[in-house]
Amino acid sequence: LHPQEPKYSQISTGSAAYTGKIACAKGGLRFLRAVGFEKREAAAGGAGCSSDAGDAPTLVLAAPDAEVLEAGKQALKAAVKEFGAKVEAARAAENKAAAFKLAELKRVSAQNNSKRDATAEAERRQIMEGMAADKAELERQRDPSNFC
């Protein structure tokens, strides 16, 4: 960290980086205030400001305290780690639920295939019995001794 450099000790609240990464994060502004950033209204006309934020207030690290910044850094790392663990736990639960659903779908599919196969086998048997009956009838009709 380089808290003495303006680049690291000033944040324009109108910048895309602030609005996209800090303002939208729950507790982002509160965290910056906790580590020593203070809100300062922009000077009229934006003199000396090279950002496109216009007249947006600026967060300034007025009196940087290395211990507070380090504690904030460690707290932020711990929060990121905890969030990662929660995301991983949620992903694992989602994967488990998906695996259960897939197993259930496979079971239902196997039941459906079994029913389909049983129906097809019954139809095949019926056709075979019909063919056997037709063959027997044809043999009976060909036998000259069966004439009335």
Image: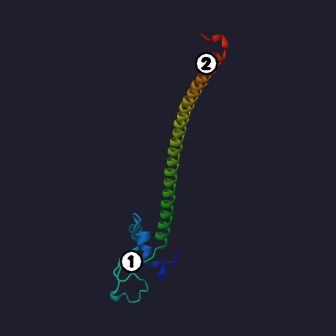
**Percent x, y of residue 59:** 39, 77
Q: Secondary structure at mark 1?
A: loop
Q: Nearer the viewer, mark 2 or mark 1?
A: 2
Q: Which residue is mark 1?
A: 14
Q: Residue at x 54, y 37 (%)?
A: 109
Q: Which residue is mark 2?
A: 137
Q: Is residue 23 above or below residue 41?
A: above
Name the kind of residue labelled 1 in the image: Gly
Q: Is residue 41 above or below residue 35?
A: below
Give left or right: position of 85 versus 39.
Answer: right
Name the kind of residue labelled 2 in the image: Glu
**Percent x, y of residue 61:** 42, 77
How many marks on residues? Answer: 2
Q: Residue at x 48, y 64 (%)?
A: 76
Give left or right: position of 23 versus 8.
Answer: left
**Percent x, y of residue 31:** 41, 67
The tag on residue 133 is none
User: 144 or 81: which is nearer to us?
Assistant: 144
Q: Residue at x 55, y 39 (%)?
A: 106
Dot 2 or dot 1: first in sequence order is 1
**Percent x, y of residue 14:** 38, 77
Query: For residue 16, which quarter of the picture?
Result: bottom left
Q: Quarter holding the C terminus?
A: top right
Q: Is residue 4 above or below residue 25?
A: below
Q: Secondary structure at mark 2?
A: helix
